[in-house]
Each structure stands twice: as C-alpha cells, then as structure tokens.
Image (cartoon, rainbow, N blue to C red):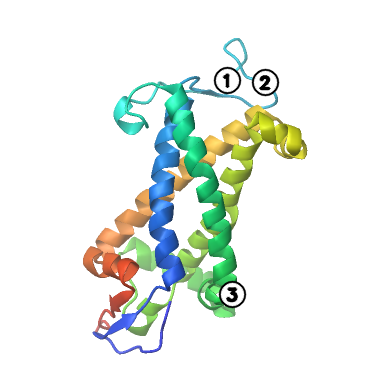
Amino acid sequence: MDSRTDTAGMVVRRHRLSTRLWHWLNALLLYVLLTSGLGIFNAHPRLYWGQYGANPDHAWLILERFGGWITLPARYNLSMSRHWHLAAAPVFAFALLFYMLWSLANRHIARDLAFAREEIRPRHIWQDIRDHARLRFPTGAAALRYNVLQKASYIGVIFIALPLIILTGLTLSPGMNAAWPWLVDLFGGRQSARSIHFLTAFALVAFFLVHILMVLLAGPLNEVRSMISGRYRVPKDRP
C-alpha cells in the first residue's frame, strides 16, 4: 500500500503489484480448490476425530451431499474432483510461499500489516469494531492504511489459515504420510486433519463472504479498481 499522498479526492497508488497478482490468483485457486474439495467430500460427507473414520464409526458431523452446481466438476465424479484439487493445490502452496517471501523483501508485511502500538489498545480496537458495525469506513489519509481489524484478518488468513489448510491437506496424502509421518501425529490422526482441513476451508469461505460484503459497502468500483490497477481515489473526509 502506497500512502505518499493523503489528499482527499486524489487518485493514488494503493496496492502493490505483488498484492494484486496474488489476490486474483488466490481467488481463482481457492475457487477451484473449494469446489473440487466439495466434490471429494461428497464421496463420504462425514467428519471424524482421530485416526479412523468409516460408516460404523461415530462421526461428529454428518452432512448431505452438496449439489452439483457448487462442485467441480458439476456432477459427482470423485476422480475428476481429485484431479482438479491436486492440480491446483501445489500452485496454491507455492504462490503463498512466493507471496510471503516477496512481501518480506519489499517490506509490505512490516510496513502495512504490522500492528502499531496504539492500534492494539482495547479502546482503539473497540472503536474500530463500532465503526465497522455502523458502516463508518475510513476516509482521507486513514483510507490508505489497513485498520486493525483488516490487519488481524489478513494476518490470520495469510499466516494461520492458509498454511494450516496446506499442512492438513498434505496430511491427507498417503505419499506425504510416508515422507513426513510427523504430520499425522501433529494433527492427531488423518481424520482429525481432515476435519481441521474442512473447518478451515469453511472459515475461509466465511472470510471471503465478509470481504465481498465490505467491498460492496465501501464502494465496489473504487475498491476493485485499486486491486486491478493499483489506482485508488481517496475518499473525502467526513465533515
């Protein structure tokens, strides 16, 4: 994020190239992974804890199979769903690693995502929560910086949720079980890893829906343009 100017109404450069490229690639890959993952889930729509999970075992969650329109492919085909999932997964993992390294090199993480001391004070956090609840979005120079809720969300997604879904996905692979057997122990068994994998996926879907809602409420044209070209019109300060 570039905050070289704080003149309200001016068009400025906002998102870095690394952020914009990763954002759209990530959106595409997450769509492929989610829809193909639901196709795989349809083969056995139950979740368990521990090492084992089969029809006679106690499942902590039992769901109906997802409709074809939300799965990839748009019909039940376990083999094709697995092909799509396994094709997108390594691209997704290496894209995340590349983005992390690039963001460290250009100081995007240190400059834009690191918490300032005053931001983590309870009074400041509570004020941000109230502003979001009342749909009072930042204006002027403040709109060029991530607020504390955005920082917490992005840090949680980039450094916790996405690595977690990658590691639990690797745990589900028999080949990785042979190469890295410690992954199974780390998550308390393959079925526990499968449960965590799907719970994290559903949490990412929730994040995506909230993210889209915030974009629509904050001004979709300006927000989407900034994520495509990097050009962002600074909202005018409130009276």
**Is residue 127 at all visible to an observer of this figure?**
no
Label 3: element kind: helix
Q: Please give the residue where the numbered disc 1 appears in the rendered image.
A: 59
**Residue drawn at x 26%, y 79% as measured from the top left:** 235
| Labels 2 and 3: the sequence-earlier one | 2
At 32% from the left and 55% from the top, the residue drawn is: 212
Q: Earlier in the sequence, mark 1 or mark 2?
A: 2
Q: Earlier in the sequence, mark 1 or mark 3?
A: 1
Q: Is residue 50 left or right of residue 13?
A: right
Read off the residue under disc 2. 52
Q: Quadrant of the N terminus?
A: bottom left
Residue 210 position in % (x across, y down): 37, 53
Q: 19 and 66: which one is in front?
A: 19
Q: Mark 1 or mark 3: which is in front?
A: 3
Residue 101 seen in the current view: yes
Q: Identity of the amino acid at label 3?
A: Ala
Question: What percent of the width, then of the height, locates residue 36?
Answer: 43, 33
Q: Residue at x 41, y 60 (%)?
A: 23
- Which residue is nearer to you in this view: 175 or 71? 175
How far from the left and from the top, in percent, is residue 97?
58, 58
Give the class, few, some or many, for how many residues have Cα within 10 Å of label 3's Cα (few <14, many ≥20).
few
Vertical arrangement, residue 219 with respect to residue 67, above or below: below
At 44% from the left and 72% from the top, the residue drawn is 146
Please name the residue that numbered disc 3 is placed on: 105
Mark 2, secondary structure of its residue? loop
Distance (Cα) linking label 1 and label 3: 45 Å
Disc 1 to disc 2, how far (Cα)? 10 Å
Q: Secondary structure at mark 1?
A: loop
